[in-house]
Amino acid sequence: MSTTLEPDGTHEGLPAYHFDNRLGGPLLSHHDRWDAWARTHAGFRSTVARGFWVVTDGPAVQEALQDWRTFSNKSVTVLEPDPRFLWIPEMLDPPLHGTWRRLLGKDFSPHAVAAREKEVRQVAGEMIDRIRDDGGADVLDEFARRFPTLIFMRIMGLPEDDLPTFLHWVHELLHLSHDEDPDAARQMAAMNAVSDYFEEQIAQRRETPRDDLLSRAMTWRIDGEAINDRDLHAFCILMFQAGFDTVPISIGWALYHFATHPDLREAIVADPSLIATSVEEILRVYSFVVPARKATKDIEVGGCPVKAGEMVMLPLAVTNRDPERFTNPLEVDPHRRTTNHIAFGSGPHRCLGSHLARLELNVAVEEWHKRIPEYRLAPHQNLEQHGNMYGIKQLRLEW
Ligand code: HEM
C-alpha cells in the first residue's frame, strides 16, 4: 500500500477513493494518509464494496461518536451494514447498552483495576526477565502480545494453558494479509474455533460456577431476566475482539517510539514520573482504532451527505492528530498539559477497559525500562503494520 491514493472519481460532489482499511502497509502509512486527507477535506466516499462515507474532520468525528441517536452501533463494520452477528455491549444502543455497561462497570472500575496492580506488575516483570539476557527479541511475540493476553484470560477465568491457542487465534483472526488468506477461510476457521471455545466455557460455568467475570455475568438480571447463553456468547466474542489485540498494539508502538527517540527514552529512565504522560501521548499520536456507525437518518457530517442506513467510518487518528486541537500534534511530548485525546473513543461506547489498558501500558513501560533501559531497532527488518487496527506486524529490538 502506498501512502497516497489516487482519487477514484467523485460521489455526490465529494472525492471518492478506493480506500480499504483492511489492507496493511509500511509503518505509519495509515497515519500519514489520514493526516493528508484531514488537510484536504472533511470527508470522502470510499468505493470499496457497496461504498461508505469516511469523515476526516477531527471535531466531526467526535461529535458523531457522541450522537448515538443518529449514528447507531447496530453495525460497527463498514462492509456489513446488516451484520449477521451481535457483539455485546459494542453493538447495542441505549438504553439496553447502558444496562450492560452498569453491570460490567464494577469489574472494570478504577478500584477493581487498581486491586490487580501487584499481579499485573508481577506477570510483566517475569515475562521481561525471561528475555532480558537474550540481547534481543521480537518484542511483540515475546512480550507485548503475551502479557496483556494472560491478564485478560485470568479476568475471564480461562485456563492459562490456553494462552498459545489464544495467541494463534488472534493472529489468524486479525493479522493475516489478503495474500495469506485470500478467501478469508483461515479467518473464518479461527472465528468458529473461538465461538466453540466460548460456548464450551459458558456450558462449564452453568454446571459449576467459578470466581470469574463470566460466572458473575450469569448471575446478572436485565429487566428481571437472567442473561441467556446467546447474549453471554456475544459478550465473550466482543471481549475477545476488544481486549486481546489493543494493549499489545499499544505496547508495540510505545517500544517502537522509545527505541527511535533515545532522548525521550533516557528521560523516562531518569525520571519515571514522565511515563504516564508519555503513554497518553503514544496512545494519541499512534491512534489505531477506526470505529464505524450506521446512520439512522439522512444527515450531513464532515460535508458527507449520509443517507439513513449508510455506514460511516470515524477514524480517531484525525481527531487525535488535529493541529487545531494539539500544538505540534505529531510530537510525543511528556510535558504536554492537555491529555484530552480520544484514543479510547468518545460518547456512550467509550472504552470500558480503559483503566485496565492504562494500568497495563504503564506497568509494561515501567517494568521494561527497569530491566532493559537501553535498546534499539534491530537492523535489516522491514517494518510494516496491519490494516483494520494499525498494529506493528513484527518488531525486533536488540539491547
Ligand atoms: C490501549 C488499549 C485499548 C484501546 C486503545 C481501546 C480502544 C477502544 C475504543 C476506541 C473503543 C470504542 C469503539 C467504538 O466507539 O466503537 C473501545 C471499546 C471497548 N473496549 Fe477498548 N481499548 C483498549 C483496551 C481494552 C481492554 C483491555 C478491554 C477489556 C479488557 C477493552 C474493552 C472494551 C469494550 C468492552 C468496549 C466496548 C464498549 C461499549 O460498547 O460500550 N478495551 N475500546
Image: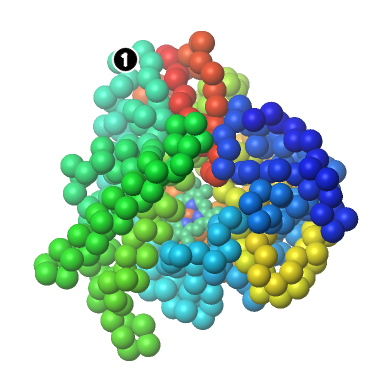
Closer-to-camera residue (321/240): 240
> Which x, y percent locates residue 62?
69, 60
Vertical comparison of 259 with 75: above or below: above
Closer-to-camera residue (241/176): 176
Please state if 74 lies on the left or on the right of 333 as rendered: left
Quadrant including the N terminus: top right
Quadrant including the C terminus: top left
Vertical comparison of 275 with 349: above or below: above
> Which x, y percent locates residue 221?
32, 82
Find out if the beta carbon at label 1 lies less than 8 Å from the nearest ligand 1 atom. no
- Three-letter amino acid code at the position of disc 1: Asp
Residue at coordinates 31% horizontally, 15% vertically from top-left? 134
Residue at coordinates 67% horizontally, 59% vertically from top-left? 312
Read off the residue under disc 1: 134
Color encoding of the figure: rainbow
For this orientation, the residue located farthest to the front is 183
For this orientation, the residue located farthest to the right is 13
Q: How many marks?
A: 1
Vertical comparison of 37 with 292: above or below: above
For this orientation, the residue located farthest to the top is 379
Residue at coordinates 21% horizontally, 60% vertically from top-left? 201
Q: Residues within 10 Å of mark 1 (few under 14, many from 20)?
A: few
> Which x, y percent locates residue 238?
41, 59
Answer whether residue 85 is visible to the viewer in this image. yes
> Which x, y percent locates residue 339?
64, 49
Please state if 138 lies on the left or on the right of 199 as rendered: right
Which secondary structure, mark 1?
helix
For this orientation, the residue located farthest to the left is 208
Answer whether residue 363 is visible to the viewer in this image. no
Residue at coordinates 37% horizontally, 65% vertically from top-left? 234
